[in-house]
Image: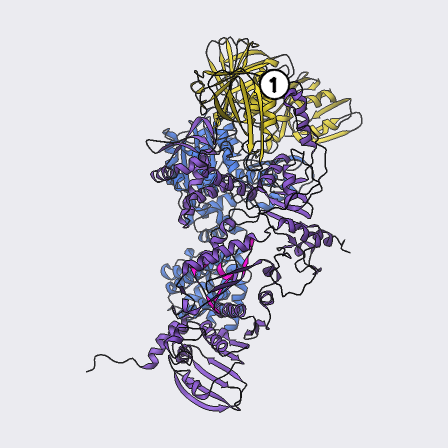
Amino acid sequence: MLKMSQRRNVSEMEGEGNGEWRMENGGLLKFSLLAHTTLLFYIAPRIFMAWDSIIGQARAKNLLRAAIAGGRVPHAYLFTGTEGVGKDAAAIELAKALRCEQLGPQGTPCDACRNCQNVAALQHSNVRFVFALPTGKGEDGRTDSPLLKLSDGEISQIQEQVAMKAVNPYHNITIPRAQQIKISSIREVKRDIAFAATEPGWRIVIISEAHQMGEEAANAFLKTLEEPSPNTLLILTSSHKEQLLQTILSRCQEVRFDLLTDAEIAEALMARNNIPRKDALLLSKLSEGSYSRAVELTNSDLQQLRFDVVAFLRAALKRSPVSVFTEVERLTAGNDRRSLERTLMLLLLWFRDAMMLRLTGREESVVNQDQLKDIQSFNSKFATASTERLIRSVEEAIGAVRGNAQSQLAFIVLALRMESICYS
Amino acid sequence: MPIIHRLPESLANKIAAGEVVQRPESVVKELVENSLDAGGTEIAVITRSAGKSLIYVSDNGKGMAEEDAIVAFERHATSKISTQDDLDRIMTLGFRGEALAAIAAVAQVELKTRQAGEELGTLVRVENGKVMELSKTACERGTSIAIKNLFFSVPARRKFMKSNATEFKHTVETMQRFALCYPHVSFALSDDDTIALNVKPSGLEDRIRAIYNQEMLNALLPFEASGDGITITGYIGRPNFARKSKSDQYMFLNGRYISSRLLSHAIFTGYEHLMDAQSYPPYVLYLEIDPERVDVNVHPTKSEVKFDDENGIYQMLQQGTRRALSNHNLVPAMTMPPQETGEGVLAALRFALPTHDRAEPFRTVPASPSPSGISPSGTSASGSTGNWRDPQPPMPNRNREATAGVGKDVLEQLFGNPNYATTPTQSTTQVPGSEAGVTFQQQVRSVEDAEHEHRLGLWQIHNKYILSQIRSGLMIVDQHVAHERILYERAVKSMEAAMPMSQQLLFPLELATNPAEFALIRELRNDLTGLGFDIALERGEKVMITGVPNDVRAGQEAAILRELLDQYEEYHQMGKTDQRDMLAASFACRAAIKAGDPLSEREMLDLIEQLFSTTMPYVCPHGRPIVIRIDLGELDRRFGRTS
Amino acid sequence: MKFTVPVKDLAQALGRISSAIPQRSPMPVLENVLLQLEGSMLSLTATDMDITMTTTLEVRGERNGALLLPARRLVDTVKALEMGEVTLDADLNSKRTLLNTSSGEYRLSGMDAAEFPQLAAFNPTITITLPSAKFGGMVDRTSFACSTDEFRPAMTGVLFQFRPNEIRSVATDGFRLVRVIDHEMQPQVSDNVDVIVPPKALQLVHKAFGAEQMTLEANSTHVRFTDGATTITARLIDETYPNYESVIPQANDKRMVIRRDDILGSVKRVSLYSNSQTRQVRLKLGGNALRIQAEDVDTGGEAFENVPCDYSETEMEIGFNSQFMREALDRIEADEVAFDFSTPLRPSLISPYGKSNGQEVLMLLMPVRLNS
């Protein structure tokens, strides 16, 4: 899979040119460097074809494939579920299937025809992918097209993000200052639908993270939902369903996307991101069911953090206030709540390992394999300490951090609790 | 076996204390009120841990005799009220006399007091409501009280105290109120090592400056109203200084801080549409009312009041507010600090409001040449702008023939004669009707040409603001709010007219509504027609729009009607009642051009022309400023041209 | 791909298609021009997915091929080149492209032509040859009245109705409507064909076409205009046009005939005094005279003019948006115009009075209800 660092190298290359990169997973990345933008085209590797490129989500996939095969596609879908579980990816796959020139059984796109490839590259004239955009200087929301007033820099950022989304449908499009799906984007959708299709057959509009539509945009979109056009499918995806207008919800057929299982995520990390098994297991436990969160974690210094939490636990059990405080300072220094939560999750995971080892005695059930010895010695030294209570105390600390508690205090309280549990 | 036990006295005190003494701030308030009653002119408050461990209040007032000092700790014992008549004429603050007793019930109290002419003062130490010590001591004239370990005997209450920062914030607010109410008294407040307030006796305006700053002072307009045993003086804030909280609203009744939603509302409505509903104008107002007309004993914290003649006071406040606002030029000018502060140029730019000779609110301020950065030219310009209801006669030398110069006239009237590049427009517009048939083409063209050549000195920046040169400097107009103001007034007028204008539609627009919307439209139908929406109601909750107001953008008709109804509902829920007014404001808000709409020069001219024909060109129906002025003098100073 | 061409020819050809290049697009491939060389024929194509323009020119071809070149850079370069000849030499494998002139070389990178969106094959159901000027006149007379409201998409375009022996063009924004019927251009179609054309395509046709004759081809989804070497293909608006015939009144019985220049001049002058937002004027009719008046309560402006006319019906007063009046009258080519009124709240009709030039022009205006 494509990694950020590799892509940067591309754009840092001097001058203009074209080229190809063979990806580690067998995919092919073609790029061309132009005056102000880098174009990337990605040809998916053979191993993740069609619906198999969606991790897990068997129920949602079956439902969609049955709808395609049975010709029962509604005029509007709403894909809901946590960020990074494959909603956009499924939307793109569905668009592929509807456009595919050689559709296989059970709505399986061929991934080879021009339609499939253009849809996958998000460059198909009948498939529109709509997402939040920044607002340009002096932009007239009434008359200007959504991109007209953006700077060249912003345009190439957007094109780059679209290209990354095409490479990896699980990519989370991030554009600075893009807070809203603009009314002008919705107008453009409306206009586009009013026009005859460029190519015959299905037209698909994907509104990614549809809750980012502002009030005006949502109301404008409502009109489009109310007047379905034949052969046109609107797919809304949203990780915050509750922020959508009730009137929009009621006009879409909802498809829920479940949290991914740890096993699914671990497998995907190994197969797609070339992550070694032990890391993949660890990451999957911390991912809270979201593949993209797991990928995000690969970029953090998780390894160091894992040792830091153990050091924290040691300090607590050493009954040394000074070293507890040093460790707490280290763990909480300059960290946002999200990463503090992650830190605590790592501790939780460690206790989980201890508990599993105690209950089953199976060493392979331990996620923190490299700390097996520590875990074993903890279990023998504090054989009477209730791992359940330890886990609960960590969970309480997570709750406190989420509830905006003073983070150092939360960690110190946790240290005291762990100490008293272990020595009771 | 006795069934009913008499509650012990200490317990009764503790229960009552809950009402009077809620937090360190209430203790400070009670004690400072006592100090003021005792005629103190120097009052110092020192707290530790925001008052949780120590509150120390000292004054230089008249002090107490020994007997009084002891009695002071007894409930309902007060030297101040002895007869029913006294109760009716309450002019001192601690009239209930329960303050000290209540405090003594929940803390350790040490009181030192000495009257003038006595050599030794009295020391009283009370704990748990019991006098533990009574002795003679050397001390300053006046009274000082130390309250230690507040709520030490009531752990439950101690728990209810908030963080030191929060508790102290309350104390600061209370002390600020005292400081504003009694400018002639010096107040000091410190907590641990923090000095939060230290003000010396002064006039009110210096006091305001000391507590806030010069900007706050500039933001205030003087307020005066009197009649029928009531006088109200003080200041109200300019509309663009509206706050999002009530924290800068001060009303004092006979020297006592009061809060009254009714009276606040009176002032708010006085701003009419200069202020939106979630905004609170700052004000400092002093009501002097004959105590016989006022009942102040309503709540132990003594800030809720009731009046005999609520309506009269309400009217006085509302009208006084209107008067104060209309007497003053409400065009905010941008001023810069008189001296370089060493900050960056941009950082030094900040907004403030001009004060004017006529409207000089603070007469005691020494006559510095330009206390708020107003240059002589600025003053003269404001002479003609100040009273926008009654424009000065037009300048004699302006070009009366100019057709396109209507806006020019308006600008001149308001801001003095602008230095337009005068292009002769001559008599091109005076087309003789009889010859029109032959030459009108040409002439029409020349009129249009003239329009083009006639550079008006209007620029649009960022598709948001219009800049214009005026004689006294530079004027900046916010196009959205300007249009909103115009539409608002037009909508009000239109609804008052019997048959308003309405562009008829070729294809009626259908609006699908739900029963509630349908009912609302039915209810508002007459006034909607007044706005220019011709509406037919059909079965199945269908609304057909057959005519629309002229000033609605094409394509927006149905959307605006719908938004209008939503906005109306919102206003309605906010408790507004005037249907037409709500409709007009909703309409104006929704139909106005937006920031980001590019305007042609002609459109800018039209906008400004129309803006200055409204009754309130400076503030939009929601209270935002429409126009900002930068005086030439300011620019000169900025560019170092000042001689 | 390799060819040599006079700089002037290439610059002109690029200029013709440049208005179809999107200024900003989420699809970067659209920021390219497609060059295709076959023998001595070079064709250049640009598209924004709504409108596609192709133009061809004669070159001295050496090596056939197709390639995408970045549009902005190519146009800017060719525009700035000195007069003379330029040779374009592209390596279709590396996509490196060399522009060679007598004084220097310019290198740029292209992209695979296959990345360019493929346009679906266009099979016209009708093909009509039209005199360009006449068709242009029809477009002029109608397209100004189009709506800009995306939420009534049908009305954002001009409706063309091809009938066996007439062509109609219609535009409306809900406040006014224009219908032009041309009896002279005989499309020779066997079936009725209705298409709604976006005005942008019509503008481009107007801008790019100069020849006397042009060809119009259409099917249910696309329309194509061809003028010699250049074609413009546009997606049609695929919506149902409102039933405009039903709103054109048939029984407006109050006719006023007036010199067009008289009323147009008066309206222009008087409307200067109308409220600049509403722009409305009041027409008072009676006794062979028309009084046009305007006032602006906001600024206190007021004006009126009396214009002689033929009107012998009962007196009436009716209000109009003066801008709509001006725009309509401006586009009527006749010495005299006829206004047909019914009541002050009903649509009024304006048409040229007297001989027509084979085109029947009808303008409909919705009045403004006046406050009395």
Residue at image point 69% right, 30% down: B450
Q: Is residue B128 magenta?
A: no
Q: Quadrant of the N terminus of chain A?
A: top right
Query: Any idea which chain is the blue one in this picture?
Result: A
Chain ID, mark 1 = C
In the rendered picture, chain C carries what hue? yellow
Which of the pair A187/A84 is nearer the observer? Answer: A187
Total number of numbered discs in the rendering: 1
Where residue C8 sits, quadrant-wise, is top right
Q: Mark 1 points at which residue?
A: C261
Instruction: Give B319 or A45, whichever is nearer the viewer.
Output: B319
Q: Which of C256 and B560 is in front in this view?
A: C256
Q: Which chain is purple?
A: B
Report x, y in % for residue C119.
54, 23
Provide the secondary structure element on which disc 1 rests. helix
Residues shaded magenta? B235-263
Q: Measured along the vertical axis of the image, is residue B113 above or below residue A372?
A: below
Judge by depth and name the residue closer to the eye, A196 or C148.
Answer: C148
Q: In this view, does A142 lie above or below C235?
A: below
Farthest residue, direction right: C103
Judge left or right: residue B256 versus residue C44.
left
